[in-house]
Amino acid sequence: MILQVGGAVPTTELELIASASFATKIVLAVLVVFSAVSWFLIFAKLFQFRRVRRAGDRFFKAVAHASRLDEAQEAIRVMGPSPYQRLFNEGIAFFHELRPGGLHHGSGPVETLTPTQLEALRMVLDSQVDAEHDLLGRYVPWLATFGSVSPLLGLLGTVLGVMDAFIGISTSGAGNIAAVAPGVAEALVTTVAGLAVAIPAVIAYNIFAARQNYIAGELEGVARELIASLAREGHI
């Protein structure tokens, strides 16, 4: 900073970063790492949610053409794994544990679930919905962390830069605006960097959290429809 006061004045952002103090460069390096990880998570989650959305469309299309649960089970058997398929299969598998072969209608009477067994089925479905909700939200909280920490880290770099600038000014004895401006400008670089990391991270976090809750709502609807279909077919 003393060299800035008595030497050449940086005129571009790159020159500001090149002539910055060691503490400022450390803060900027950490923010660069935060930004890289944040964008990696953003693109990874975008790909994941797009894949889940397409799988959901295929699931609902296959189920819509099935008139009975056993037909729906056969229709989704060839589909790739998805939250919708896992929920449906978990519910059917637990039902078969309670009533082995219960979906296949024969000539005899259909044995229905007891109230206790029905409540256990609901608990299994709710547990699977919660598990899928947590799986969809994996690593998403990191975006919120980057969004909240990055501005504070940028502010820390700004404070350190301003302190360094004033130390340089007091050491050199220069007090005009030309001597103060480069140090203040250097200090503000970390604030800009912190905001640049935080803004897309916060936006992405809000979008992914909304999509996560939306898919969880669809899964709850699938669980309710599964129980309703069991009731329509006389299993409840």
Image: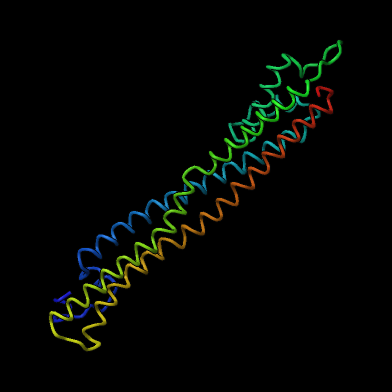
Quadrant of the rendered structure where residue 94 is? top right
Instruction: Looking at this view, name the residue that lies furthest to the bottom.
Output: 176
Quadrant of residue 194 in the image?
bottom left
Observer-nearest residue: 23 or 80?
23
In this picture, residue 184 sits left or right of residue 168: right
Screen quadrant of the C terminus:
top right
Residue shown at 51%/54% (left/top)?
205
The residue closer to the viewer here, 27 or 54, is 27
How are the residues colored?
Answer: rainbow
Residue 212 percent across, percent down from the top left: 59, 46
Q: Please state the total of marks drawn on the protein image.
A: 0
| Quadrant occupied by the N terminus | bottom left
Q: In the drawing, does residue 110 fall left or right of residue 59? A: right
In front here: 4 or 75? Answer: 4
Q: Is residue 194 above or below residue 89?
A: below
Q: Is residue 24 left or right of residue 111?
A: left
| Residue found at the far top of this picture | 108
- Residue drawn at x 30%, y 66% as measured from the top left: 157
**Would residue 174 be found to the left or right of residue 40 on screen?**
left
Q: Is residue 3 above or below residue 126?
A: below
| Rendering coords of residue 226 (x, y %) | 74, 31
Residue at the spot x=60%, y=49% of the render?
Answer: 211
Residue 193, x across and y down, in percent: 36, 65
Which residue shows up at 65% across the image and 40% down it?
56
Q: Is residue 80 above or below residue 192?
A: above
Spot occupied by residue 110 in the image (x, y as percentages of width and height): 83, 16
* Furthest-front residue in this view: 116
